[in-house]
Amino acid sequence: MCLAVPGKIVSIVEDEQPHLRRGKVDFGGVLKEVCLAYTPEAAIGDYVLVHVGFALNRIDEDEAHRILDTFREMDELAQAQAEAGGDTAEPEQARPETGGDGS
């Protein structure tokens, strides 16, 4: 499964070679340099979905906020579950191996 995170483009560095187009993207206060080669239409102020440092496509601001709200809700649910002792992220107990003869 892949996860792309929405961010807002705050600056763009144009290059003579389009495959080197990049920009600074704001992820809720964290600025990262992102490759914009796959989104040549993206402009400052646009929201893009970013996966492993590449902006994959533009999205509108409402969609970006819906995605971020969903991430927050997932985090709150995971925290509540952990506080209630229902954290299912714990690895299962390893079962002792039996001998080669099935015993």
Image (cartoon, rainbow, N blue to C red):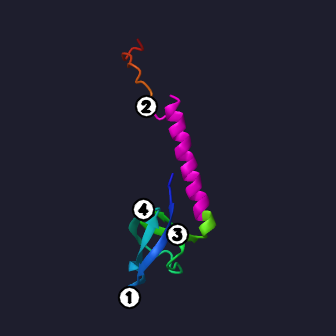
Please name the amino acid that badge 4 sits on: Val
- State which mark lies toward you, 3 or 1: 3
Q: Quadrant of the C terminus?
A: top left
- State which mark lies toward you, 3 or 4: 3
| Residue 88 in picture, x, y percent from top left | 50, 32
Please name the amino acid that badge 1 sits on: Glu
Density class for disc 4 (Cα within 10 Å; few <14, some 14-19, many ≥20) is few
Density class for disc 1 (Cα within 10 Å; few <14, some 14-19, many ≥20) is few
Q: Which residue is mark 2?
A: 91
| Residue at screen point 59% across, 61% down | 65
Label at residue 48: 3
| Residue at screen point 49% across, 34% down | 82
Which of the pair 48/91 is nearer the observer? Answer: 48
Residue 87 appears in the rendering: no
| Residue 77 in picture, x, y percent from top left | 56, 41
| Residue 63 in picture, x, y percent from top left | 62, 64
Magenta residue span: 64-91
| Residue at screen point 39% across, 14% down | 101
Rendered image quadrant of residue 18: bottom left
Q: Which residue is mark 1?
A: 16
